[in-house]
Amino acid sequence: MRFPFTGVIPVDKPRGVSSRRVVDVVARALSMKAVGHAGTLDPLATGVVVVCVGHATKLVDYLHGLTKHYSAVFQLGRGSPSDDLETPVEPEENPVRPSPDEVEAAAAGFRGDILQRPCDYSAVHVDGRRAYRLARAGRPAGAALEPKPVQIERLAITAYCWPRLEMEIACSSGTFIRAIGRDLAESLGTRAVMESLVRTAVGPFVLERALALDRIESAAVGGAAAAGGAAEGIAGAIGLLPAVAAVGHLPRIVLDEGMLELAARGGLLAVDSGEESLAAVDRNGMLVGILRRQASGGHRLRPNFLGR
């Protein structure tokens, strides 16, 4: 199948908007159905949501593996069922007021590879149902939510004046930032709710270069009015990046014409590389597919072409 556009768009999601809404706005702007995002961001959070368009939707799994960066603010001495401000907040009567040194010492236990129990208000499945649906029905999953391994590459306390605690976090996909605040507070003998959350980067896609959602909506309306819906102009206006931008972290190989023809026929390529995956580009630097090592094929890798 051919698509009019293929690429990625880092979008700055505003507060109160779902990640699904971001996808819908881009889909309408480009008049395409093949649009998806590479990682949900809660409606109350803001920041980077990477949207994939056309054949680049096949690259979502590679984007999921990128490190995500956040700036979070927590309020200590209070809690809520959702661990943020989405549900009613309950102040503690006589809250513990940990010192800055105590907070810093506790934070050390949340760096590196840790086990983390997902939040009751999350999209994790429990017996076939989303945890947040159970919680809203008055039956929070609690202990049924088994801890999962996540990696916290960086956790820095950037400001603390009780009850307000600010942190910057770099972590693996699947990490619940709310849960970090919840568990850190619990280790200090108190509770916490997340006041705000900003996703500042997904791998190389940084907030400073992300496109505001309202600008995408404006570009779509303006493009339709000015050029009869000139899609190329709209794509340029909303900052569609080439698909290769999504796999900049992968080793790259340039395929010559013979290799491209062989790969297009589904053939195996003999590639002298020990890598599990390679970003295959043509001589112009355009991404044509991902080469994956075959279990029985030595260094031969079968391409999964974006256009196939």
Image (cartoon, helix red, strand yellow):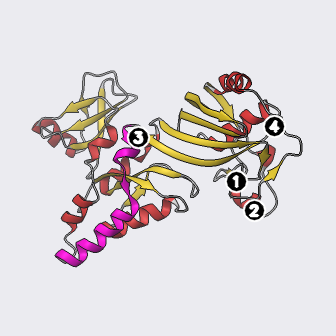
The residues tagged by marks 1 and 4 sit, at their Cα atoms, a distance apart of 20 Å
Mark number for residue 25?
none
Would you say residue 108 is visible in this rendering? yes
Amino acid type at circle 3 is: Tyr
Estimate the x, y position of residue 143 in percent, counting from the top left.
80, 43
* x and y, in percent, of residue 196 in the image: 60, 49
**Comparing labels 3 and 1, the label whose residue is closer to the camera:** 1
List the residue tagged with mark 1. 121
Helix, strand or loop: magenta stretch: helix
Q: CA distance from mark 3 to mark 2?
A: 33 Å
Which residue is labeled 3 in the image?
A: 62
Residue 99, percent across and down? 75, 27
The disc, 3 or 1, on the residue closer to the chain's N-terminal end is 3
Callout 2–callout 1 Cβ contact below 8 Å: yes
Q: Secondary structure at mark 4?
A: loop
Displayed quadrant of residue 213:
bottom left
Tell me the number on the disc at residue 190.
Answer: 4
Q: Which residue of the protein is positioned furthest toward the front in this rendering? A: 161
Q: Secondary structure at mark 2?
A: helix
Determine the CA span between mark 2 and mark 1: 8 Å
Q: CA distance from mark 3 to mark 1?
A: 26 Å
Say which residue label 2 marks.
136
C-alpha span from label 2 to label 4 = 24 Å
